């Protein structure tokens, strides 16, 4: 399959397949893909490129044996020399740089190939789907180094409040295979099995209607919306889908035993 290198600098690499699957690799293996200021700059650049690209789904993973060991400790120590106001401003910019990449208007998949800790785990939680290799070490250990959680950590706690609260308040590191963590992941399996499952999920999403997914994502990512508002927005979105003509073509192809290639 033809692949285009969309981005390869600032400790990030993005490969875009003709199918619309884009694979983004955190590429700082000597530091277990710690989240550096350099990578943050790359995240903003790549986010802009992805929104203008033909990508239909984005798969995030880490180079080498880790997904991400969390924040770059050297950068955090540098910030301790600043005033509280200046370090707060720097951290907010840091968060927004990364989350611009992980909260794209595109479905996102975390392929957690190894240790995934602290801010790195927050980025995995920001993804729509999460597949993790058995026994990978995961957790959010901010409080273990005297730092309150960051990277919107408390926001992601809404997904599984009791468990994620425990992770944030204790700073404990867990095995992804811990049965209590099952609800945080789509699948926990061997390295080989997870790779297959990620490929299948990404390919299925890439073949689906981009318009349908684009309209659905804001509702999926905001479970706090009242039911009536969700139904109202669903109806408006379905009206939009019905007006394009793709539904008739897709249904006709399905009846003929063919696969329709969505354009919109």
Image (cartoon, grey):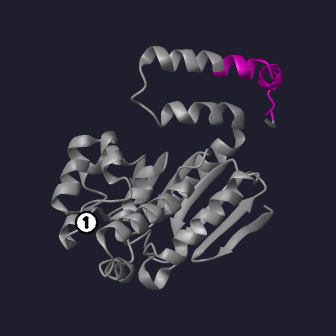
Could you say which quadrant of the image residue 6 lies in? bottom right
151 left or right of 148 in image: right
Residue at image coords 50%, 20%: 230
Q: Which range is magenta? A: 237-260
Residue at image coords 65%, 22%: 237
Residue 92 in percent (x, y) is at: 42, 61
- Callout 1 secondary element: helix
Residue 52: say if magenta: no
Could you say which quadrant of the image residue 90 lies in? bottom left
Residue 108 in percent (x, y) is at: 55, 50
Residue under circle 1? Answer: 142
**The C terminus lies in which quarter of the figure?**
top right
Q: Is residue 258 above or below residue 112?
A: above
218 left or right of 154 in image: right
Q: How many marks?
A: 1
Is residue 36 among what the camera can see? yes
Residue at image coords 33%, 65%: 118
Q: Is residue 77 above or below residue 258?
A: below
Could you say which quadrant of the image residue 213 lies in? top right
Observer-nearest of 215 and 42? 42
102 left or right of 22 in image: left
């Amino acid at each position: 399959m033809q692949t285009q290198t969309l981005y390869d600098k600032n400790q990030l690499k993005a490969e875009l397949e003709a199918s619309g699957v884009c694979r983004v690799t955190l590429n700082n293996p000597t530091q277990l893909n710690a989240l550096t200021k350099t990578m943050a700059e790359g995240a903003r650049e790549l986010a802009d490129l992805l929104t203008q690209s033909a990508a239909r789904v984005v798969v995030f993973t880490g180079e080498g044996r880790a997904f991400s060991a969390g924040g770059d400790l050297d950068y955090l120590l540098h910030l301790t020399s600043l005033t509280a106001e200046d370090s707060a401003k720097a951290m907010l910019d840091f968060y927004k740089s990364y989350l611009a990449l992980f909260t794209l208007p595109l479905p996102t998949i975390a392929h957690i190939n190894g240790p995934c800790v602290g801010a790195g785990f927050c980025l995995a939680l920001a993804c729509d789907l999460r597949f993790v290799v058995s026994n990978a070490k995961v957790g959010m250990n901010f409080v273990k180094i005297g730092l309150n959680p960051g990277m919107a950590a408390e926001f992601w706690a809404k997904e599984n409040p009791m468990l994620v609260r425990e992770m944030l308040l204790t700073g404990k590191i867990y095995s992804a295979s811990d049965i209590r963590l099952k609800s945080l992941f789509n699948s926990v399996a061997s390295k080989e099995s997870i790779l297959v499952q990620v490929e299948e999920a990404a390919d299925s999403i890439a073949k689906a209607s981009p318009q349908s997914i684009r309209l659905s994502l804001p509702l999926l990512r905001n479970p706090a919306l009242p039911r009536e508002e969700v139904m109202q927005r669903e109806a408006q979105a379905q009206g939009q889908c019905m007006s394009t003509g793709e539904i008739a073509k897709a249904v006709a192809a399905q009846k003929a035993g063919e696969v329709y290639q969505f354009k919109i």
